[in-house]
């Protein structure tokens, strides 16, 4: 049975919504983007939502709006995808990497130890859709001693008066924290709407705005929307009307807008998201039921008294294996035409970041999580039969590699 890792969910409603966009004669930023923003706003509980063309662009634009400079520091986990760090670098600031917890997410204690007067932003990441400890992070940045250490380097930071928390929610649309969906717990949260995400627009992202007073999130939405369109005073939809050609450029903007034809895909998906999320939960729970019985398997976090995952991917860990053995298990699984993945190679292990001076030896938990992790497919289209095939393939692959090791040791 051939099982792909993460195909996009495309049904007749998605095709119909995209076709409607194509037939409308308007395929770039317009009414479907606005409708998707409203759907995400309602789901997340955010004050305002701006859709953009990728998570990465949204993060760069947000950091640039905040006014980060060359000596400013942004604290991120070492265990994340490269976009988290690259966005900081493209915005002109310095990523300060810290280690993670056993649950994959950034360590709050490590954040605290890393804060200096140069710290301007904390950028936690909801790995695999499991929410970070928002309460602890938001409480920490408001502590008198931490606020007293804060040195703003832009007028916006001065208005803020403390470290800004921008949550990398790339995986976590639909997850829950404290009885609410993620996207409203930090100053700003950014979802990814990339092709492999729970809700996709092929490529895209959504910036959730929850800035505290004295900021007005409606005004901020207008500012960032302008910034996402090269700071052009008329968007293409308005400028395209008869006699409405004249425009101005009022700042150093970016080309970051989402197109209607992309938004149409996400719009059709998010309108049925409760059902799609339930299907992901079905897959997740089947994995949990099977792997929780095996002494060598470490199942990922699912829910506790405050949190529930978005069921984005199933991050299984294998006890007492080396990185090479983990790789061999993946190779055995692949022999059955089943695609699995690893989330993630820690940033310090990647050539570019290692060349900047980051060393994986400084992040032992990140390495442990990585070396033992195999990401299993988890998506609505995955049948119960396919789920059982994945489970059996993992079990058989583990036994094959462990038996090979045992036989090698005896010889």
Image: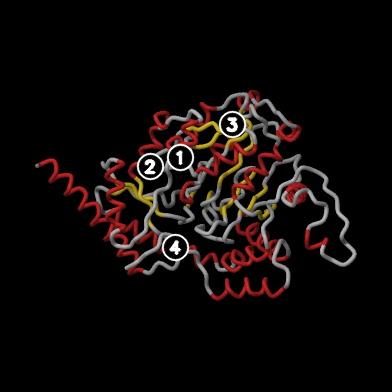
Q: From the image, tell me which residue sits under label 4.
A: 379
Q: From the image, tell me which residue sits under label 1.
A: 79
The numbered mark, 2 or 1, whose residue comes first in the sequence reads: 1
Q: Report, in whole angstroms, how far the alpha carbon at label 3 lies from the one at label 2.
A: 24 Å
Q: Residues within 10 Å of mark 1 (few under 14, many from 20)?
A: many
Give residue 370's mark: 2
Q: How crowded is mark 4: few (under 14 residues within 10 Å), some or many (20 or more)?
A: many
The numbered mark, 1 or 4, whose residue comes first in the sequence reads: 1
Q: Residues within 10 Å of mark 2 (few under 14, many from 20)?
A: many
Q: Report, in whole angstroms, how far the alpha carbon at label 3 lies from the one at label 4.
A: 36 Å
Of badges 3 and 4, the one in the foreground is 3
Q: Report, in whole angstroms, how far the alpha carbon at label 1 lies from the one at label 4.
A: 23 Å
Above or below, comparing residue 24 to residue 212 in the picture: below
Instruction: Indicate left or right for 104 with 32 as reference.
Output: left
Quadrant where the N terminus sits is bottom left
The numbered mark, 3 or 2, whose residue comes first in the sequence reads: 3
Q: Report, in whole angstroms, how far the alpha carbon at label 3 lies from the one at label 1.
A: 16 Å
User: Based on the displayed image, in which of its 4 quarters is residue 335 positioned?
Assistant: bottom left
Q: Nearer the viewer, residue 200 or 100?
A: 200
Above or below, comparing residue 179 to residue 93 in the picture: below
> Where residue 240 sits: x, y (%)?
82, 64
> Where residue 305 sits: x, y (%)?
46, 48
Secondary structure of the residue carrying numbered label 2: helix
Give residue 94's mark: 3
> Where residue 400 sits: x, y (%)?
20, 53
Q: Residues within 10 Å of mark 3 (few under 14, many from 20)?
A: many
Please, which residue is most extreme toward the right here? 243
What colouring style does the render use?
secondary structure
Q: Which of 266 and 220 is in front in this view?
A: 266
Secondary structure of the residue carrying numbered label 4: loop
């Amino acid at each position: 049975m051939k099982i792909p890792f993460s195909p996009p969910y495309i049904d007749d409603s998605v095709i119909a919504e995209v076709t409607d966009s194509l037939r409308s004669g308007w395929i770039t930023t317009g009414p479907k983007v606005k409708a998707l923003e409203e759907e995400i706003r309602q789901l997340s509980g955010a004050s305002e939502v701006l859709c953009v063309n990728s998570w990465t662009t949204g993060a760069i634009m947000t950091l640039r709006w905040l006014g980060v400079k060359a000596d400013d520091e942004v604290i991120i986990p070492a265990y994340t995808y490269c976009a988290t760090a690259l966005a900081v670098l493209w915005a002109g600031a310095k990523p300060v990497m810290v280690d993670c917890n056993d649950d994959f997410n950034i360590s709050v204690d490590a954040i605290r130890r890393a804060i200096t007067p140069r710290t301007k932003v904390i950028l936690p990441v909801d790995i695999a859709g499991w929410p970070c400890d928002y309460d602890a992070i938001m409480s920490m940045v408001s502590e008198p001693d931490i606020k007293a250490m804060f040195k703003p380097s832009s007028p916006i930071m001065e208005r803020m008066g403390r470290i800004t928390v921008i949550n990398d929610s790339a995986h976590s649309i639909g997850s829950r924290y404290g009885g609410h969906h993620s996207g409203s717990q930090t100053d700003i949260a950014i979802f990814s709407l990339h092709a492999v995400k729970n809700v996709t627009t092929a490529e895209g992202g959504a910036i959730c705005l929850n800035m505290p007073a004295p900021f007005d999130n409606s005004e901020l939405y207008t500012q960032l929307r302008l910034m996402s369109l090269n700071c052009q005073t008329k968007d293409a939809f308005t400028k395209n009307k008869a006699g409405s050609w004249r425009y101005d450029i009022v700042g150093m903007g970016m080309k970051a807008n989402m197109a209607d034809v992309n938004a149409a895909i996400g719009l059709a998906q998010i309108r049925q998201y409760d059902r799609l999320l339930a299907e992901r939960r079905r897959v997740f729970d089947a994995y949990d039921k099977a792997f929780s019985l095996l002494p060598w398997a470490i199942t990922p976090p699912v829910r506790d008294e405050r949190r529930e995952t978005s069921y984005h991917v199933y991050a299984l860990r294998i006890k007492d294996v080396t990185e090479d053995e983990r790789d061999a298990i993946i190779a055995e699984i692949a022999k059955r035409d089943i695609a699995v993945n690893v989330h993630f190679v820690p940033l310090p292990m990647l050539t570019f970041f290692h060349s900047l001076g980051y060393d994986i030896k400084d992040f032992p938990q990140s390495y442990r999580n990585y070396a033992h992790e195999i990401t299993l497919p988890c998506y609505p289209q995955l049948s119960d039969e396919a789920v059982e095939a994945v489970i059996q393939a993992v079990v058989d692959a583990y036994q094959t590699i462990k038996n090979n090791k045992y036989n090698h040791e005896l010889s």
